[in-house]
Amino acid sequence: MKFQWAVQIAIFLSEKVSTMNFCVYLDNGHEVHGYFVPDGFSKQPKIHVRVNGEDKITEINCWIYLEGAKAQGAHETGNVAFVLSKDNVPGIDLADDLEIIDPDSGLVFYRRDKFGKYIPKKVFRLETSYVPQMEIDLSLKPYFQFFEHRVENYGFETVRQMLEIIHQPSVYVSGRVLLKNYLLYIDYNIDTTLISLRDPFYELATRLIIFSRFKKHRFRFVTERDKTLFLPVIEWFSDVDIQDEGSIRKKIRSAPKDTLSLLSSPFTHQLIASSPSDVARLDDVSRALDRLSQFTLFDAGRYESGYADNIAELLNIPVGTIKIKPQLEPVHQLADILRSISTVEHILEADLILYHFIQKAEHKAFSNQEG
């Protein structure tokens, strides 16, 4: 099984994901200057431009040579830059709304901010729920000039580029990524960070439900990388009856150690690991707590509406703007079963200690407020 685990990780690390680089560094109303390096060393760089929300798309082949793109091995020819004007994009000089899009992924990597309508903050939300809380992100989309969520679907270089955007003051990036790999870019360019955790048993229950049903339902939010990484979990728990307490107990207690290790303390792992193969240990809890303390807004996941209202207050938008789906009773029921299985306590050991300290700090804060 150890060999199988090593093979799965090797496949995971070598698996190709969408990687691109982009930048728009000038928009004076008459001209837009930037570059776009596509996912593909020899691919012809091209962009789509939409003016004032019209259905019509103007396709532009990038043609200007950029020394860095060729010298750094990002593109074969280096012809990745562009200048947009009324000559190649009619109406661009009069447009209130302008979007520049990667035609392959659909990523809108530039929106014009003609009237200062966007929030002048650079926000990163670390997604910790395996079922992404997209409703939070989509509630905030209209308020940001650059917006992208579920960035775990992109490669490292593309996510780094999103976090490094310097020519746009309004940026929102969200995804379930390993925090350590992006701390450098977050620390120097992102001014607002958001995170929410929840009961570790609830999170594990969520994952078991998803993986046990994956072969039949093929949930779209499960990335290609996760299909490889969690394949042993998907195979082992496939079609298990999550409402049958005896069946759940038997499956978990007889599961191979390497399979269960894939479910080990996901919160601590996400906060301190740099690789999927890293294992969260008890002595990592203090580092995880330190990372949590550096977030602008942290929520313990007890009251969804409270988290939503706190985000709204932080960003100075109307309370009630942000939507969050309530937690699900069937997931709570499975979580209660998992609490009584000693093997599960061992799997979640680091996360349970982490969450204990969080609850303790939360209780102390409430007591001080009441006092």
Image (cartoon, helix red, strand yellow):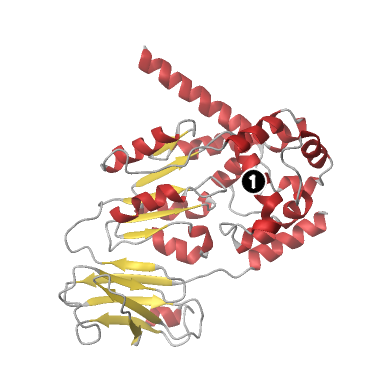
Across and down, in percent, residue 269 comes to 60, 45
- Residue at x-position 48% and y-position 86%: 76
> Is 136 situated above or below 357?
below
Residue matched to label 1: 207
Q: Position of residue 57 (x, y in %)?
A: 32, 79
Q: Is residue 318 visible?
A: yes
315 to 54, vertically: above or below: above
Which is more toward the observer, 328 or 32? 328
Looking at numbered disc 1 in the image, what kind of residue is underneath it? Arg
Question: Which quadrant of the figure has residue 44?
Answer: bottom left
In the rendered structure, the answer to whether residue 203 lies left or right of residue 337 reads left
The relative height of residue 31 versus residue 273 in the rendered view (above or below) is below
Tell me the element at label 1: helix
Q: Is residue 149 left or right of residue 3?
A: left
Which residue is more in the foreground, 263 or 317?
A: 317
| Rendered location of residue 156, percent (x, y) | 51, 63
- Residue under the point 58% across and 34% down: 329
Quadrant that contains the C terminus = top left
Task: Answer with the quarter of the image where residue 281 lies.
Answer: top right
Q: Quadrant of the N terminus?
A: bottom right
Q: Residues within 10 Å of mark 1 (few under 14, many from 20)?
A: some
x, y percent for residue 253: 82, 38
Q: Is residue 339 left or right of residue 190?
A: right
Query: Residue at horizontal 43%, vertical 49%?
Result: 135
Residue name at image x 21 percent, y 56 percent: 117
